[in-house]
Amino acid sequence: MIGKGFVLKICGITCQEDADAAIAGGANAIGFNFYPKSPRYIEPERAAAIRTAPGVRRAGVFVNEPKERVEEIAARARLDTAQLHGDETAADCPASLTVWKACRVNGAFDASRFGGFPAEALVLDGPAGAAYGGAGIPFDWRVAGGTGWRIILAGGLDAGNVAEAISLARPWGVDACSRIESSPGKKDHDKMRDFLKAAKAAMEAQA
């Protein structure tokens, strides 16, 4: 499904019901959070038990884990992609997985510092202070243009702003989490469906 040209990702999946609703709504990637301090943390065995349709990318969120640990969890949870949200260097990237490198955008964004990363895409997330990952806060989407990278936008996206974000950044994909939840780790299916519908329409319009 990723081969159709863009990524529609729902992150922070913790149960089968939410995974099913995301995929039914058009998501072609879902994310599991393996950062123990996250309110959306899921154990690898629970993630492995969540079924997905053929062609749906299974991504795992990691923060400063040794690459051997990432590969171990990826095998147990049946992951396709490691989304690295910490202070990882190129040497920390697991060789057996596709890598998406996440970074927080605070003001100006300089993609050149990721030149040596063996990553398929950069995930641009909003500011989060001292915390890792995003905090549901948007950033200036215009900074995503002209980087030379495939860009996945994250951070504060919902049905009300995703079309504008896509028109300004022209990304490869979008990733939503906290703004489409009823509580941390539990998706609001109406908000999720509306987000995916708006995102798909906007991505197709820019193709």
Image: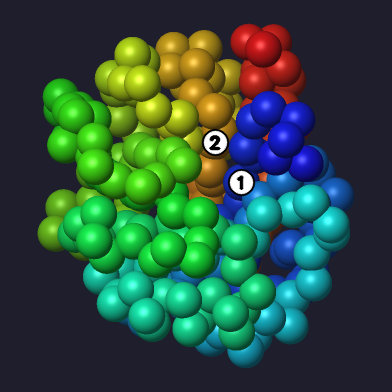
Q: Is residue 138 visible?
A: yes
Instruction: Determine the CA span between mark 1 and mark 2.
Output: 6 Å
Are the residues tagged 1 and 2 within 8 Å (C-beta)?
yes
The residue most toward the front is 95
User: What type is the residue that disc 2 sits on?
Assistant: Val
Left or right side of 1 for 170? left
What is the x, y in percent for residue 18? 73, 64
Left or right side of 115 for 21? right
What is the x, y in percent for residue 109? 19, 27
Q: Secondary structure at mark 2?
A: strand
Q: Give the quarter of the image for residue 8.
A: top right
Residue displayed at 75% across by 30% down = 4
Q: Is residue 35 visible?
A: no
Residue displayed at 44% across by 31% down = 151
User: What type is the residue that disc 1 sits on?
Assistant: Lys
Q: Give residue 9's mark.
A: 1
Q: Secondary structure at mark 1?
A: strand
Q: Give residue 176's mark.
A: none
| Disc 2 target residue | 174
Left or right side of 16 for 106? left
| Residue toward you, 115 or 78 | 115
Mark closest to the chain's N terminus, 1 or 2? 1
Q: Give the quarter of the image for residue 52.
A: bottom right
Q: How is the image coloured?
A: rainbow
| Residue toward you, 1 or 117 | 117
Total numbered labels:
2
| Residue toward you, 36 or 147 | 147
Q: In this picture, is 65 found above or below 149?
A: below
